[in-house]
């Protein structure tokens, strides 16, 4: 579903991603872990279509098509969804209005009939139960006055409503206590399906106790330094990023003794 | 400064000196230095008056006019006396007049690795950790009662939640004031240090109650260090008698 080949990304002249390769199949959950500054959020934002990030080399294929050629709104119509680390507030635009407009844009693009207000409300109420969201939040402006945890739950709620094909969650777990984390994880888990893929970007391992990844990648200094199963996350938790880096340096030195 | 204020400040300073002298010479140097600096600063600051902006609406003159004696080892508090402040669903760390009481505490339900112990003991058992945070989060440059509390720093409670540990049970941090039975005004200075390491989580309530009657003055100081991705839900419940008490301003570091 998603193929990232040799991706190099720069922002304001600074190289951030230095050759990232990643393949994600439908039905999979990939976790991308890394220390601050490794380029995790950059990867998410490039997938979403943020302009400041310049792709200097490499390509991204989404459902076989060139993703980088697509405008962000077209990517969204094609089913790419991103949950932000710091969700923005949109004062004056109610949650329900925002979502109805977004969903209908996607439905129209797919050749489906747009939902009217009644059908939409029914549809949305089901989704609210999924993420244990209070109905009163429907009419509030998007994220306005929401606590950190509420914003993150709102992101998952949006995801549930918009029925994405590729969901990229950028540090969804940051700032959440364990109860909120479980709610978010539950929401994500209910959406797992063979037609959908998830890319979870996270710094801490705990989220992966609740959303079990198929593949874990460790992003270090702009490259995927290691990939493995879910045990890799636990190894990382134990050793820390520096520990893992050191281990890799040692391994490389052992294989190629310096002259 | 008006005469009554000077009297009480002087009394505290004299007591601070006596207190320092009576302590074990084997104490960590940094702790002794911290107390000395705090005592010096308190001597400079004195007791706050309503002429200071922060204290405009809080007149502590009644406290300033009273000569307090540092609370010594008073009689033990009966479990029965605090029964209504104990909740079986909560873990409990009890202080009596600022001193940690293991007999009145209930810490069995806490996960492995969680430390809840007397601050005095923690200074011996976990010297590096305590030293890393104690007196570094709560500054006494401008704060009268933080200076005063630090000048008498000796005991209280040290709470540490290790990396990644989520404490399910909330903690009732019960601070019991037990005034002198004869009615002599006593003062004490509970010190609370909480360290929540990376990705840990804890919920606690600082719960202030009184057993018995009589004038007393308490100036607790709480320092909280919250590690990355850690969560501390901190509440404060004041259920003391109507005697004016001191400044309790939690200082949170991150």
Image (tube, rainbow, N blue to C red):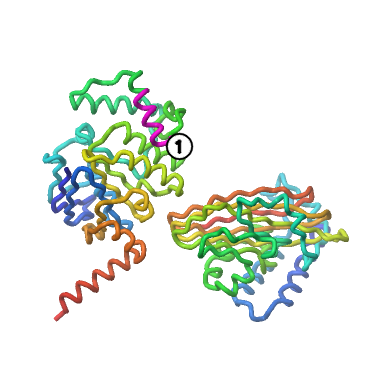
Residue B242 in the image: above or below residue A118: below
For the residue labelled by badge 1, is the local secondary structure a helix, a strand or a loop?
loop
- Residue A189, image quadrant: top left
Whole-percent x, y for residue A121 in the image: 37, 23
- Residue furthest right as drawn: B182
Residue B168 in the image: above or below residue B151: above
Q: Residue at x 19, y 27 (%)?
A: A110
Q: Residue at x 16, y 79 (%)?
A: A258
Q: Looking at the image, can residue B139 be seen?
A: no
- SS majority, magenta: helix
Q: Looking at the image, can residue B68 be seen?
A: yes
Region in magenta: A122-132
Is A131 covered by the magenta stretch?
yes
Whole-percent x, y for residue B135 in the image: 59, 65
Task: Name the residue carrying label 1.
Answer: A146
Q: Check the residue under mark 1 and report the chain it is in.
A: A
- Residue A137, image quadrant: top left
């Amino acid at each position: 579903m998603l193929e990232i080949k040799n991706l190099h990304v720069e922002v304001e002249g600074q190289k951030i991603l230095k050759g990232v390769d990643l393949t994600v199949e439908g039905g999979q959950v990939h976790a991308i872990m890394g220390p601050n500054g490794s380029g995790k959020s950059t990867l998410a934002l490039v997938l979403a279509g943020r302009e400041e990030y310049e792709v200097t080399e490499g390509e991204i294929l989404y459902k076989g098509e060139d993703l980088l050629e697509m405008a962000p709104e077209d990517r969204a119509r094609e089913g790419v969804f991103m949950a932000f680390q710091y969700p923005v507030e949109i004062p004056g635009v109610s949650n329900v209005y925002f979502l109805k407009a977004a969903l209908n844009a996607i439905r129209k693009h797919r050749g489906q009939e747009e939902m009217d207000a009644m059908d939409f409300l029914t549809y949305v109420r089901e989704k609210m139960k999924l993420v244990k969201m209070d109905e009163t939040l429907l009419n509030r402006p998007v994220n306005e006055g929401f606590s950190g945890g509420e914003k993150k739950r709102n992101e998952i709620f949006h995801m549930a409503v918009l029925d994405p094909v590729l969901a990229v969650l950028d540090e969804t777990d940051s700032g959440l206590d364990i109860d909120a984390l479980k709610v978010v994880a539950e929401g994500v888990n209910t959406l797992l399906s063979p037609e959908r893929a998830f890319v979870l970007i996270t710094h801490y391992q705990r989220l992966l106790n609740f959303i079990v990844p198929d593949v874990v990648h460790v992003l270090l200094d702009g490259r995927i330094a290691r990939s493995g199963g879910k045990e890799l996350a636990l190894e990382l938790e134990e050793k820390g990023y520096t520990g893992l880096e050191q281990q890799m340096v040692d391994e490389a030195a052992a294989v190629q003794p310096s002259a | 400064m008006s005469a009554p204020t000077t009297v009480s400040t002087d009394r505290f300073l004299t007591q601070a000196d006596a207190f320092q002298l009576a302590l074990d010479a084997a104490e960590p140097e940094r702790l002794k230095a911290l107390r000395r600096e705090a005592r010096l600063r308190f001597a400079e600051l004195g007791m706050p008056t309503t002429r200071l902006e922060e204290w405009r609406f809080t007149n502590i003159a009644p406290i300033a006019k009273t000569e307090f004696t540092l609370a010594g080892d008073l009689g033990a508090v009966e479990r029965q006396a605090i029964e209504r402040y104990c909740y079986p669903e909560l873990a409990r760390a009890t202080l009596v007049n600022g001193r940690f009481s293991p007999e009145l505490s209930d810490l069995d339900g806490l996960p492995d690795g969680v430390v809840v112990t007397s601050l005095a003991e923690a200074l011996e058992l976990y010297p590096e950790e305590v030293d890393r945070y104690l007196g570094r989060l709560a500054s006494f440059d401008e704060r009268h009662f933080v200076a005063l509390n630090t000048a008498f720093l000796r005991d209280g409670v040290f709470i540490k939640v290790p990396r990644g540990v989520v404490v399910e049970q909330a903690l009732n941090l019960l601070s019991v004031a037990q005034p002198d039975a004869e009615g002599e005004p006593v003062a004490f200075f509970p010190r609370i240090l909480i360290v929540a390491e990376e990705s840990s989580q804890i919920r606690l309530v600082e719960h202030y109650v009184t057993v018995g009657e009589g004038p007393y003055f308490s100036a607790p100081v709480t320092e909280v260090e919250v590690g990355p991705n850690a969560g501390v839900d901190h509440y404060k419940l004041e259920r003391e008698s109507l005697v004016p008490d001191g400044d309790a301003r939690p200082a949170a570091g991150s």
